[in-house]
Image (cartoon, rainbow, N blue to C red):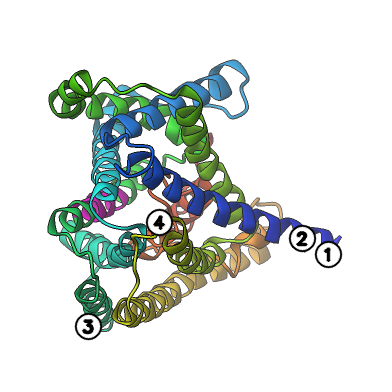
Amino acid sequence: MISRQLVLTYLYLLIYICLSSGVILFNKWVLSPKYFKFPFPITLTMIHMAFSGIVTFFLVRVFKVVAPVKMTFHIYATCVIPISAFFASSLWFGNTAYLYISVAFIQMLKALMPVATFIMAVLCGTDKLRWDLFLNMVLVSVGVVVSSYGEIHFNVIGTLYQVTGIFAEALRLVLTQVLLQKKGLTLNPITSLYYIAPCSFIFLFIPWYLLEKPEMDVSQIQFNYSIFFLNALSAFALNISIFLVIGRTGAVTIRVAGVLKDWILIALSTIIFPESVITSLNIIGYAVALSGVVLYNYLKMKDVKANQLPADNNSDRATKDKKSLSIFRPDNSMDNNDGTVVGGLASEAAAVDEEAPLIPSARLSYVTRTQTGSFINR
């Protein structure tokens, strides 16, 4: 049994790495003017949202694979709509960057995600400004600057698009924590896409109508429905793989797998797209940035364990005093390897891909219960 579980764990990790890398390379291939020649990132993102919304509707409402949460108009207006807006923005800007810069350089710029999320968390009051964390953010930023300086095909527009998408994603993650956790709402990848994908589609429709629709009418591009179906299916499957991996191993493992995936993706991108060239300065800068990210995650995980310790002691004490009382205890997969950040979601941001709208419900539910002691019935 142990060997079988280990094989399944590594299989899920392999599927996650393949899907995550495949979606990014697939998007680059579709959007690149040199290959598939479909330079319409908003349209591609809308296809993803439409596909995810339709599939999750059937999974939730028709086949009832998962149960919908208790969603009120107030929660939808104050939580889902703003989160969907920033989710749509992050996908829009992130996919647009593929038109201007290489996949390898995009992955290097994504090392800024913890920096952006830390800044947003401090500004929103969900995290405190600490010197040890701040110095790690400086280290990450210096690494990204060095990597950018070593980029041969540096493009200002593409870099601005990617950095803007990163900050939009960071603000979405902070809003997820501030809005959803306070209301005790738990969403898994299926239910989150069920509520967020249609709303994101509507937000994307306005810029699509103004920016891309006129160009599409002039260009008269022929749609290859099989290509777009496979692309959208890959993006949807990525969400499910993230949920499966974190549910079986924990957020720490998927972050380690994410780092491995980034290195593999950078290497693959230079093979698949010959115009993508990596310099020694790129590698040095990216290594410096990753060292800062790893150290930052380590400090945040220490904070998580410190915050969990009082809750565990209270549970033990309550168990001794009242044997008949039912106390929530997380399963083994969430005991020691849980890496969810209580004070901010920066380290979780390093693990979640751009197609994943929310952190998995197991992580969100556990943080909510350990912080507030509330038990939410779904």
Figure quadrant of residue 37 = top left
- Tell me the number on the disc at residue 3: 1
Quick one: label 3 or label 2, which is nearer the N terminus? 2
The image shows residue 210, relative to residue 42, as above or below, that is above
Three-letter code for the amino acid on which mark 3 is drawn: Trp
Q: Secondary structure at mark 2?
A: helix
Viewer-nearest of discs 1 and 4: 4
- Tell me the number on the disc at residue 7: 2
Question: Badge 2: how crowded within 10 Å, few (<14), some, or many (20+)?
Answer: few
Q: Is residue 15 left or right of residue 128?
A: right
- Tell me the number on the disc at residue 40: none
Q: Residue furthest top?
A: 62
Residue 240 picture location, percent across and down: 56, 42
Residue 170 in magenta? yes
Q: CA distance from mark 3 to mark 2?
A: 42 Å
Q: Which residue is mark 4?
A: 273
Quick one: label 4 or label 3, which is nearer the N terminus? 3
Range of residues picked out in magenta: 164-174
Quick one: label 3 or label 1, which is nearer the N terminus? 1
- Tell me the number on the disc at residue 131: 3
Q: CA distance from mark 1 to mark 4?
A: 38 Å
Viewer-nearest of discs 3 and 2: 2
Q: Residue furthest right?
A: 1
Q: CA distance from mark 4 to mark 2?
A: 33 Å
The image shows residue 239, relative to residue 222, as above or below, that is below
Residue 54 picture location, percent across and down: 47, 21
Q: Secondary structure at mark 4?
A: loop
